[in-house]
Amino acid sequence: MRKHTIDAEYGVRQMLQLACKEPVTRNRRRRPFPLESEVPGFAEYLRSERGFAESTIRNYRRHLDEFAQYLSRTGITSFSQLSAAVLAAFTVQYRPKVAPRTRLGFCCHLRVLLRFWHREEITARDLSGAVRIPQIYRLNDVPRSITWDEVRRMLEAVERRMIRGRRDYAILLLLVAYGLRTHVVAKLTLDDVDWKDERLQVLARKAGHATVYPLAGVVAEVITDYLKKGSP
């Protein structure tokens, strides 16, 4: 047992000595930057003149690699063959189902490359304007609707044993059952509920008109539960 321990310690000691004396280096060859042979210096331009971080440059590499593959597929062997129509076709065909922000990043990267080409006199004119930047709206990522399964799970998550939970459940059920907007539900009063004829009256924001809906039994039940057990 003692001999095995000594052999293990000796092996670990040798590994530590080797690591301290000689730095570990990668033998794998670095893949050239996309289009580097046709446009030398672009990666260094991004790094030195633009001051981009290596993570940003890796994003450029990925996007420009896709652009280089597109040029190869279409048979374009010289940048003199590039035109606004070719660039527009590529931006339209570029991963149709990609997220809008990913498409925005790609178009911006391609524009930077095209401006660099023109600056280096590789292309006769600046073609960056041919790459249309997609519009990204502030709430663009918000889903337009949710599934019925998500609606069910949302309603089940409400703690109806609490006063606030009873109120929230009634509000959510009004939103779900009638498709009302939040400001409309917020303005509802007891006068808008016709208990006798089982109707719900919703006043419009403009012109003072009202829309009358049948009062669903489940909606009437949760409103009554809140009024009896939770309303101040």
Image (cartoon, helix red, strand yellow):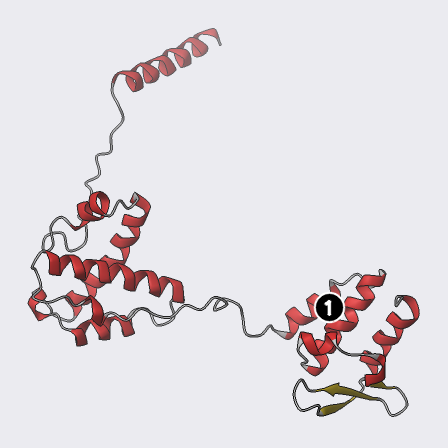
Task: Mark 1: give few (<14), some (14-19) or many (20+) Cα within 10 Å.
Answer: some
Q: Is residue 125 above or below residue 40?
A: below
User: Which of the 4 quarters of the picture holds residue 175?
Assistant: bottom right
Q: Is residue 145 left or right of residue 134?
A: right
The number of numbered discs placed on residues in the rendered structure image is: 1
Q: Is residue 53 left or right of residue 220?
A: left
Q: Could you say whether the residue bearing mark 1 is in a helix, strand or loop?
A: helix
Q: What x and y, as percent, mark residue 82?
A: 12, 70
Rendered position, 38 above or below 86: above
Instruction: Pick the residue in front: 221 or 186.
Output: 186
Q: Is residue 221 above or below residue 138?
A: below
Q: Which residue is mark 1?
A: 155
Asked whether 37 or 192 is in front, the reply is 192
Q: Quadrant of residue 27?
A: top left
Residue 67 percent across, percent down from the top left:
22, 63
Asked if residue 77 can be seen in this view, the reply is no
Q: Looking at the picture, tell me which residue is in the foreground, 207 or 16.
A: 207
Q: Outermost residue, front direction? A: 207
- Residue at 79% across / 72% down in the picture? 170
* Residue in the picture at 36% in, 15% down: 11
Image quarter (top left, top right, bottom left or bottom right) of the C terminus: bottom right
**What amino acid type is highlighted by mark number 1?**
Leu
Horizontal side of 137 relative to 160 (left or right) equals: left
Q: Position of residue 129 (x, y in %)?
A: 21, 69
Q: Name the residue at 64% across, 69% down.
A: 150
Q: Quadrant of residue 26?
A: top left
- Give left or right: position of 152 versus 80: right
Residue 92 visible in rendering: yes
Residue at point 22%, 38% (across, down): 28
Residue reaching furthest right?
A: 228
Front position in the image: 190 or 163 = 190
